[in-house]
């Protein structure tokens, strides 16, 4: 890393673009609030969710944001835990984005509880510790507390903060792995669902978090530096580019392994046929939304030598990675519920209560509004954060980041 000292400043842009973005995010927040009040007043029957598919589109948004939070913190962890100094200037922004993503995801879950007063019971400590959901409430709160402490050690000037910097980084790194493991285990422990019953879902969610968290962080980083007219060099962007490619490949490997494992077990053949070759919405979304657009296309954009320093290609690769991660979560969670429960193995079940038939689901506009409100909360926290506090390095130019950069 260069001997030049990294300086951090707030953003100074107060023009129409800044306030216009605030207004746009405020619009999505109001729309999400309206969707919440409508569902709270009329009940969840007005949504596309039903007794067969109880986790709908808002839950995909929520889990996506929660999983991405862990991955966004990965940038700071690489600099602190693994001593890669080139990533250390991004540590502050990494922590801010991680907290913002988690809060945005939790807001969606909170508003979609149906009985929001149940949060009061959780706050009292009335948790069922046999439930993985109860453990996750502790993991979420602990994550916000630890990352906030980690940010303090990076931003404070006291000697105590400097001494606690590495221990805080190691603690946050360990905790985020636990958090994503807990989120993946919510589904991996559900043995009643043929599509969920797999221990590999926990590590799959971890590596997926690395990919979508970094992709989300990259888009925010490039957009923020472009709008604030700050310089960011190709050395750092190419490091992040190839790191994203590795995470995409690893996610694809884990997903292929999951399906091959299921295909090996006869009891999972039916659900694998439904997801991989059913000719339905979920199989099309898996192959075209995740495999083609969300994995193969970004890999081409990342590893094509002709596009090495092409920032538009990197932005597109990051965007497609986000689309692919969202598509994969949709297939796993909603597609897993769409496949009927196997109540009586090796028997054909048919009744008037949806037994033995594929379940249908179609999200309504209110579910989209609620999900986008969570994204708006995330972006609003980041926007206000970089406006009032020193999260952004003044420059990430090659001459600042890389001591061997050509003059």
Image: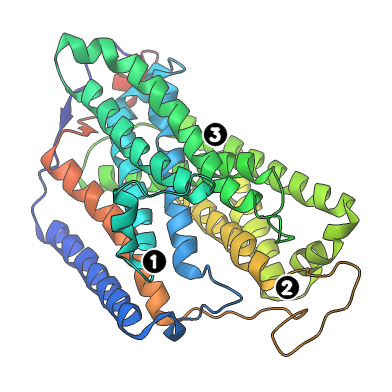
Query: According to the image, what is the colour scheme of the structure?
Result: rainbow
**Against 81, is 185 above or below?**
below
Residue at position x 73%, y 70% from top? 341
Which residue position holds label 1? Answer: 113
Spatial separation of the CA atoms under disc 2 and disc 1: 24 Å
Q: Earlier in the sequence, mark 1 or mark 3?
A: 1
Q: Earlier in the sequence, mark 3 or mark 2?
A: 3
Which residue position holds label 2? Answer: 340
Crowd tier of the residue under label 1, counting other residues whose Cα lies within 10 Å: few below 14, some 14–19, many 20 or above: some
Q: Decide if residue 226 is on the left or right side of residue 261.
A: left
Towards the viewer: 406 or 166: 166
Residue at position x 54%, y 46% from top? 130
In the image, residue 370 lies at what x, y percent?
35, 70
Foreground tag (3 vs 2): 2
Which residue position holds label 3? Answer: 242
Towards the viewer: 16 or 138: 138
**Against 212, is 401 above or below?**
above
Q: Which mark is residue 131?
A: none
Look at the numbered disc 3 and give the secondary structure of its residue: helix
Whether residue 181 appears in this view of the structure is yes
Spatial separation of the CA atoms under disc 1 and disc 3: 39 Å
Towards the viewer: 12 or 136: 136
Look at the numbered disc 1 and give the secondary structure of its residue: loop
């Amino acid at each position: 890393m260069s001997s030049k000292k990294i300086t951090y400043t707030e953003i100074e842009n107060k023009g129409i673009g800044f306030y216009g973005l605030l207004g746009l995010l405020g619009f999505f927040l109001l729309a999400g609030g309206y969707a919440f009040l409508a569902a709270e007043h009329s009940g969840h029957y007005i949504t596309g969710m039903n007794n067969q598919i109880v986790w709908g589109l808002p839950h995909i948004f929520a889990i996506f944001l929660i999983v991405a939070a862990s991955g966004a913190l990965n940038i700071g962890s690489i600099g602190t835990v693994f001593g890669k100094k080139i990533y250390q200037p991004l540590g502050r922004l990494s922590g801010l984005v991680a907290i913002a993503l988690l809060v945005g995801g939790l807001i969606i879950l909170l508003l979609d509880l149906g009985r929001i007063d149940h949060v009061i019971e959780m706050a009292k400590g009335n948790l069922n510790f046999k439930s993985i959901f109860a453990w996750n409430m502790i993991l979420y709160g602990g994550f916000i507390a630890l990352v906030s402490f980690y940010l303090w050690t990076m931003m404070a000037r006291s000697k105590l903060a400097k001494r606690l910097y590495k221990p805080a980084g190691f603690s946050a790194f360990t905790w985020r792995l636990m958090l994503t493991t807990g989120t993946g285990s919510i589904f991996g422990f559900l043995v009643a669902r043929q599509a969920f019953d797999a221990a590999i879902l926990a590590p799959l969610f971890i590596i997926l978090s690395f990919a979508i968290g970094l992709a989300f962080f990259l888009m925010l980083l490039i957009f923020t530096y472009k709008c604030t007219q700050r310089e960011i060099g190709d050395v750092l962007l190419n490091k992040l580019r190839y790191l994203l490619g590795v995470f995409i490949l690893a996610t694809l490997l884990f997903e292929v392994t999951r399906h091959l494992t299921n295909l090996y077990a006869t009891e999972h053949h039916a659900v694998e046929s439904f997801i991989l070759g059913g000719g339905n919405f979920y199989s099309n979304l898996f192959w075209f939304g995740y495999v083609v657009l969300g994995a193969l296309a970004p890999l081409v954009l990342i590893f094509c030598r002709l596009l090495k320093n092409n920032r538009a290609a990197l932005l597109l690769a990051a965007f497609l990675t986000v689309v692919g991660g969202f598509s994969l979560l949709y297939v796993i969670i909603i597609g897993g519920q769409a496949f009927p429960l196997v109540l009586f193995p090796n028997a054909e079940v048919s009744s008037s209560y949806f037994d033995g038939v594929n379940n249908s689901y179609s999200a309504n506009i209110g579910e989209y509004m609620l999900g986008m409100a969570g994204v708006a909360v995330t972006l609003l926290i980041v926007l206000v954060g970089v406006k009032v506090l020193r999260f952004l390095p003044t420059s990430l130019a090659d001459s600042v980041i890389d001591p061997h950069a050509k003059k």
